[in-house]
Every structure is written in C-alpha cells, then in structure tokens.
Image (tube, rainbow, N blue to C red):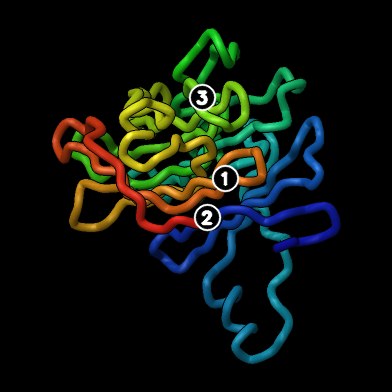
Amino acid sequence: VYDGPGRQLGAYDTDGAGNFFIVDHPIPLQVPSVTNVYKFNGGSLFGPFVSGAPQASFSSVLSSGQDLRRPQEGVYDAGSGQILYANNNAGLGIDPNAVHAVLGVNTTTGAQQRIVEETNLDPFGNIPNYLQLTGITESPASAFDYVFASPNGGSQIGNGTAGQGSTLWGLNGVNNPGTSTFIKDFTDADVVADIGRELTFVGSIANIPGTNDLLMSDAGFADGITAGGVYRVELNDITGAYEGISKVLDAS
C-alpha cells in the first residue's frame, strides 16, 4: 500500500482510544531514509470509506525522521503511551546514523527514544545479535514485557543466505535503558530436528492468547526454492526460555 509516489506504508497499531498510527518509508530506501508516523482518528479514517467519500489525507504527521528509518511491526504500550517499533535498517548499512533498536514513539508528543539498541555492528563476530529487527509483540511469558525478532543475527547452518539466521529476544522496560535478553537462535540443530529446516527470515510474530506460545512467520531461504511458513514457538510461561517449535503452515 502506498501513500504517495516513492512511499510505502508499513505497520499500524491502535491506542485503544480510537486512534490509528501508520508508518511509511521511502522506496527505494534512501540515505537518510526518513520515516513518518501518521496519526488518524478511527472515525475520520474509516468513516468516509464506508460512505464512498475520499479518504483522509496523509497530512497528520506525529513523528518523522530521527531514528525511525524503516520500522517494521509496532505494538502499543498503554502504560507509557508509546508505540514500540522494531526498527529495521536493512540496506542502510552505509548510513552511520542508522540504529538497530526497539524504538518508542510517544503517541501524544511524537517524541522518540531508543529502548534497547544493538551497538556491536560486526555481523559475524557478534552472534547472536539483532542488527535487523522485524516483529514485536506482547510476551506470552511472565519473564518479559515484550518479545521481538530479528531476521538476521544467528549462526546460519543450512542453505540460506550466508551469515543469516533469525533470532528471538525478550524485552524488559519501555524506557531507556531497557534490557534485551537472548532467547533463541533459530538455526540451532534442535530447531532443524523439529521442523526440518532453520528459520532464516522471521517477519511478523504474535502471542497466542491464553498460552505461553508465539506464532512466527518465516519467509524461507534466499535461494528462491525453499519456501517459508508459519510456526508455533513454545516458551516457558515463567522463565521465557525456549521449549520447542512446530510447523503450523508450510508454504512449500
């Protein structure tokens, strides 16, 4: 979905009070890559659609630029009044100001903050890492406030892209400094034993209400042959430790 020439819409979330927040980024990515966070009232965004009148324009920019370069999923944190974004700087490695972090954007003021940040930029000597981030969701385990995923930062062992392997992390705190805790490298041998492959490009994640499990989507290998799917990841409901993975939907 596009909001104008050279702009692509990304994640959105709601604040429980009728407001919707949508992000975009330029395509192709630019240096610097300036992302906008738009704030809409639910009625003004969806009401005209029902009546056939023109949609509201993308003019209500809540926050723009700074550390937001290519945010992926977002999740609203009611306690702090922020949307927490998994900020993905893939393709922006030449930009020295690009950060790899979970960012908080205040839904009233638009203020941005880095909650946790991966500062060691060596993709091979610093494993596991989260030099790219994609999914973030409420934690199904009491040990963490949220969990987030990176499509890169594990020890790739199969036929995917060299150096690429998805990782899962726990997040505690919604203000800087928060803390990140490594949970799982999805290129580990036990993952391969359980589902027949490693996860090399995890995208969206979501918790399954009433369980200590997550649903995770994976795009598959970069070989153009090995397809991805949807997987169920079980965490210990108290410690948040990884306990197992199973296949829900296979795209191959």
The residue type indicated by label 2 comes to Ser
**x, y (%) of residue 151?**
53, 35
Asked whether 123 or 247 is in front, the reply is 247
Q: Is residue 147 above or below residue 123?
A: below
Q: Earlier in the sequence, mark 3 or mark 2?
A: 3
Q: CA distance from mark 3 to mark 2?
A: 20 Å
Tag in front: 3 or 1: 1
> Which residue appears at 60% of the width and 88% of the height?
50
- Label 1 or label 2, whichever comes before in sequence order: 1
Crowd tier of the residue under label 1, counting other residues whose Cα lies within 10 Å: few below 14, some 14–19, many 20 or above: some
Q: Residue at x 71, y 46 (%)?
A: 25
Q: Residue at x 66, y 32 (%)?
A: 90
Quick one: SS at disc 3? loop
Q: Tell me, yes or no, whether the two marked residues, 1 and 2, touch with CB atoms within 8 Å.
A: yes
| Residue furthest right in the image | 5
Cα distance in 3D space between marks 3 and 1: 15 Å
Horizontally, is 48 left or right of 190 in the view? right
| 217 and 14: which is toward the camera | 217
Using the rendered image of the protein, determine whether residue 110 is visible from the camera's viewpoint: no
Q: Amino acid at mark 3?
A: Gln
Around disc 3, counting alpha carbons within 10 Å, would you say few (fewer than 14), some (14 to 19), or many (20 or more)?
Answer: many
Residue 184 bears which disc, if any? none
Residue picked out by circle 1: 226
- The location of residue 183, given as percent across then percent down, is 32, 28
Left of 76 or right of it: where is 234? left
Quadrant for residue 52, please give it: bottom right
| Residue at numbered disc 3 | 156
User: Is 202 situated above or below 15?
Assistant: above
